[in-house]
Each structure stands twice: as C-alpha cells, then as structure tokens.
Image (cartoon, rainbow, N blue to C red):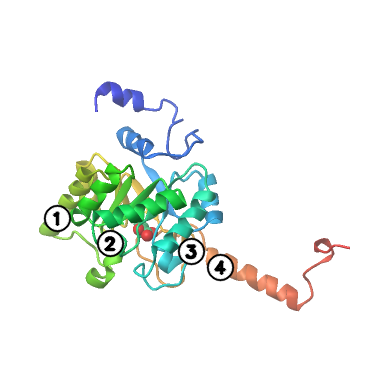
C-alpha cells in the first residue's frame, strides 16, 4: 500500500468504519479489505433467522455468518456434519431478508465442496443465486486451495476457515490447533495458501493467541478469530453462546453478554402461570 492510498483510506471522522460508521448500504468485501488497511478491528456474529439477523443488523454488526453451527445451535443436531445445502440455503435466505447493511457470509456445509472445485462452485452458486448471500465460507487451508481459487475466479468472495475445523470433528475432535513448531508452521502455510487462492478473510478457530497474532501480521487479508486471542483483525462468536441461550458448557473463549436462556425461561413460566391463574388475557388484551 502506498502512503497516499493509506491516507485516502483513512476515515478522518470514523464515518467509514465498519462498526459505528455512517454507511447504510450493504457492506462488501472491498470495505473489509479497506478496514484491514486502516487497521480497524471489526465484529462478526452468527445468525440463522431473519428476526435475529435484523437485531444484529440494526446494532451495526457489519458481517453476519450463517454458520453451519446452525446444526447444533438451531436445528438440534449434535455437530455441524449433518447440515445440508438445502438447510443452509433456507436459513441464509432468511438472514438476507432480515438485513440491509450487514455482509452475509454463508457456510458451505460438509460434503458440498470436498469433492473438488466444480462441486464447490455448484454449491456456492446456489447460496449466491437462491439465498442472495454476499460471500461463502469453507473449511481447510491448502486442501481447499483449488476450491477457493475457482469460486473467486467465478466472482464469489470466499472466507476461509483454518485451525479447528468443526466439519472434521470425527477426525480431529475439538482440540486447540497449531501447538508446537511443526503445527504452527503448517498453519502459517495454510493461511498463506488461502490468501494466495484469493480468500478475502480467514477464520482462525481455537489457535494459540501468539500464533494467531503472527498469522495476522503475516497476511494482507483480515483474520477473524474465535478462541484465537485478542490480536486478530476481527472477532466472531456464535450468537447463542454470546447471549447465553446455549444450554450446558460453552467453550472457555466465549464471553456471555446476556442470559437469554434465563430471560426466556422465566418469561415462559410467567405466561404459563398467568394462564393457569386466569390473569392473562386481562381486559386490555381483550376485544369487544
Ligand atoms: O459455523 C460457525 O458458526 C463457524 C464459526 C464458529 C466461525 O464456523
């Protein structure tokens, strides 16, 4: 980047900021690239339906991920593995309909891109044409290089995902990735491979903070951390974890900003008690 272009990209008043800026049009991958040049950090959340997505869009979250975490967080599966392209298309369409500014990124689910680049293009095309998403995400570094390249050549922006890749849970489990010199070097190679293939950003999941910082310094594209420490360009959380709706244990890297499970459960109980006690509906809820 030249000094001049750095100055041109620098918002004097923060008006172009991805979060907290004044823009109202749909965010694009070019806006994401400019944010990296400005050194701006940004937030990303998952969303799986129009109503929740509209709340996050109105809150100014610049990027929403229709993650295949929908499998365990929304659809009742144990893992992301069973999620289908039909399900992702339906959920992604709803998220696009519920938003006007956020860039919507949809996951390519397991089994819809591993066969090769042509299969990946067919699957991603469905998400772009039928659901209207602005970008897709897929898992894997060097192993997904060909897929990323073909999608980008076809005009479909790709967010890559390395480190812990939940679609490979049966092979790798849910363990921190990139520990030790060899594994760290492999992760750096994976990060560079997805950048070379044309990815516009890369998710780093469950990676030691020091390694995530090194990957972030080494890349021109932004890194999006989840369990990857404070030094990535962006941070993503699964919304049901972040708002306390997930039951049971959540990973150590999650910060809970609300306890919606408690709020919703106690509201449901209040409603039920009112019905049992004939306290609802009251006169103000009745028509005559
Ligand atoms: O599916 C998902 O929600 C994800 C995030 C954890 C990055 O891939």
Q: Nearer the viewer, residue 209 or 4?
A: 4
- Give the label on residue 186, or none: 1
Residue 92 tag number: none
Report, in whole angstroms, how far the alpha carbon at label 3 lies from the one at label 2. Answer: 23 Å
Residue found at x 41% / y 68%: 72
Is 172 positioned to the left or the right of 67 in the image?
A: left
Q: Residues within 10 Å of mark 3 (few under 14, many from 20)?
A: many
The foreground one among 238 and 89 is 89
Query: CA–CA distance between discs 4 and 1?
Result: 42 Å
Q: Is residue 80 above or below residue 60?
A: below
Mark 2 and mark 1: span between their CA atoms? Answer: 14 Å
In the picture of the structure, the residue carrying the numbered disc 3 is 244
First along the sequence among labels 2 and 1: 2
Residue 71, visible in the rendered structure: yes
Q: Residues within 10 Å of mark 4 (few under 14, many from 20)?
A: few
Q: Determine the secondary structure under disc 2.
A: loop
- Camera-nearest residue between 280 and 151: 151
Q: Which residue is mark 2?
A: 165
Crowding near pointer 2: few (<14 within 10 Å), some, many (20+)? Answer: many
Mark 4–mark 3 CB contact (< 8 Å)? yes
Question: Looking at the image, do the residues carrying marks 4 and 1 touch, with CB atoms under 8 Å apart?
Answer: no
Please identify, in this view, whether the residue under mark 4 or under mark 2 is nearer the observer.
Answer: 2
Q: Quadrant of residue 273?
A: bottom right
Pick whichever of labels 4 and 2 is earlier in the sequence.
2
Q: Earlier in the sequence, mark 4 or mark 3?
A: 3
Distance from mark 1 CB to nearest ligand 1 atom below 8 Å: no
Q: Of circles 1 and 3, which is in front?
A: 1
The x, y position of residue 193, in whole percent, is 18, 48
Q: Position of residue 74 (x, y in %)?
A: 47, 66
Distance from Cα at disc 1 to Cα at disc 3: 35 Å
Ligand 1's quadrant is: bottom left
- What mark, if any, has residue 262 been given in the picture? 4
């Amino acid at each position: 980047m030249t000094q001049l272009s750095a100055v041109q990209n620098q918002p004097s008043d923060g008006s172009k900021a991805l979060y907290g800026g004044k823009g109202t049009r749909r965010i694009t991958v070019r806006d994401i690239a400019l944010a990296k040049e400005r050194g701006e950090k940004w937030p990303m959340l998952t969303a799986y339906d129009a109503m929740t997505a509209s709340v996050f869009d109105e809150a100014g979250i610049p990027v929403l991920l229709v993650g295949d975490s929908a499998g365990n967080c929304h659809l009742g599966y144990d893992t992301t593995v069973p999620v289908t392209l039909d399900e992702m298309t339906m959920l992604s369409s709803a998220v696009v309909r519920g938003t006007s500014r956020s860039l919507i990124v949809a996951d390519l689910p397991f089994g819809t891109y591993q066969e090769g680049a042509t299969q990946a293009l067919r699957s991603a095309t469905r998400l772009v044409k039928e659901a209207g998403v602005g970008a897709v995400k897929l898992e894997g570094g060097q192993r997904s290089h060909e897929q990323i390249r073909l999608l980008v050549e076809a005009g479909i922006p790709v967010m890559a995902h390395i480190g812990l890749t939940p679609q490979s849970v049966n092979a790798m489990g849910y363990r921190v990735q990139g520990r030790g010199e060899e594994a760290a070097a492999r992760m750096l190679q994976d990060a560079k491979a997805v950048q070379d293939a044309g990815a516009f950003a890369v998710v780093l999941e469950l990676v030691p903070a020091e390694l995530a910082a090194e990957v972030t310094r080494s890349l021109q594209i932004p890194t999006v951390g989840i369990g990857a420490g404070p030094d990535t360009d962006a941070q993503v959380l699964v919304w049901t974890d972040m708002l306390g709706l997930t039951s049971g244990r959540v990973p150590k890297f999650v910060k809970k900003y609300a306890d919606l499970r408690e709020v919703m459960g106690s509201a449901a109980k209040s409603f039920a008690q009112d019905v049992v006690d004939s306290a609802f509906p009251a006169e103000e809820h009745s028509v005559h």
